[in-house]
Image (cartoon, rainbow, N blue to C red):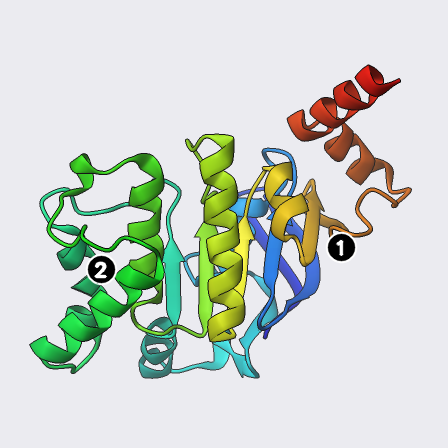
Amino acid sequence: MIEVKNIEKSFGDTKVLKGITTTFETGKTNLIIGQSGSGKTVLLKSLLGIHTPEVGTISFDGRIYSELTDDEKRDLRTEIGMVFQGSALFDSMTVEENVGFPLKMFSKKTPTEIKERVNLVIARVNLIDSNHKKPSELSGGMQKRVAIARAIVNNPKYLFCDEPNSGLDPNTAIVIDNLIKEITEEYNITTVINTHDMNSVMEIGEKIIFLKNGLLAWEGSKKNIFKTDNEAVTSFVYSSNLFKKIRKAQNKEV
């Protein structure tokens, strides 16, 4: 579990995060949603240690990040997997080399052990027979699968995903969402996903954090997001493409 207590983050005179307090639960897909400029990316980068909040604490299973030594922070980073918005694969490397890169950098596994682990996670994301292909030979959805495989190859406790469905068609996006959810449950990972996609919210939103103007305006699950009377949330939901499609379909039925 990741616990966030009253964190504040400013850039110059602009306060971007304004006293955020919440938890991201283990074994669940935790989504951060909100309009552009709401503070989603700054919160994610604060969780990753890229930004340092001026106020408040972030703790990983009881370990307060700001109180850790440099060595302890380095150890914690080996427990984190990251899926970047654009996949961020190395173009000159094969799928196998991309996925194995974290193990070569951060583990003491032998080449044989690395190959066994790489093959295992490549199979887990359904990319068998793609080991020796380059990213340029793969579709966007396949590249995202490689990014997920690389993120979990080190068996992380925490998985962060920044707009994992960016640039994907709706059907592929659903497949990626479900893969992330399956892996989260299978490995009992604390997964945090930064997204603006209401399809993701309705597919895998077990814990949803809604930010507005740097404040935590609402939190709940996909089961109750349509039931809330919070105006900020309803405005965000009802302006989404997903809701427009649902409303259009309902009008046709009438």
Real-space CA distance between mark 1 and mark 2, rounded to the nearest whole angstrom: 34 Å
Q: How many marks?
A: 2
Residue 223 sits above or below residue 6 on the image: above
**Who's the residue at 59% across and 71% down the image?**
57
Rate crowding at label 2 as few (under 14), some (14 to 19) or many (20 or more) other CA atoms within 10 Å: many
Residue 157 shows in this picture: yes
Question: Quadrant where the C terminus lies?
Answer: top right
Camera-side residue: 217 or 227? 227
Tag of residue 99: 2
Camera-side residue: 181 or 10? 181
The reply to whether discs 1 and 2 touch (Cβ–Cβ < 8 Å) is: no
**Can you give x and y, in whole percent of width and height, for residue 56 in the image?**
63, 68
Instruction: Locate residue 229 relative to residue 216 in the image: left or right.
Output: right
**Who's the residue at 48% across and 56% down the image?**
180
Instruction: Locate residue 157 relative to residue 10 in the image: left or right.
Output: left
**Can you give x and y, in whole percent of width and height, for residue 228 in the image?**
87, 45
Camera-side residue: 53 or 116? 116
Per the image, the residue denoted by label 1 is: 219
Which label's residue is closer to the chain start, 1 or 2? Answer: 2
**Who's the residue at 57% across and 84% down the image?**
62
Kindly indicate the quadrant of the structure image that contains residue 116: bottom left
Residue type, numbered disc 1: Glu
Instruction: Locate residue 127 relative to residue 178 in the image: left or right.
Output: left
Residue 189 shows in this picture: no
Question: Quadrant where the N terminus lies?
Answer: bottom right
**Can you give x and y, in whole percent of width and height, for residue 223 in the image?**
79, 52
Kindly indicate the quadrant of the structure image that contains residue 154: bottom left
Tag of residue 102: none
**Can you give x and y, in whole percent of width and height, for residue 60 in the image?**
53, 76
Q: Residue furthest front?
A: 253
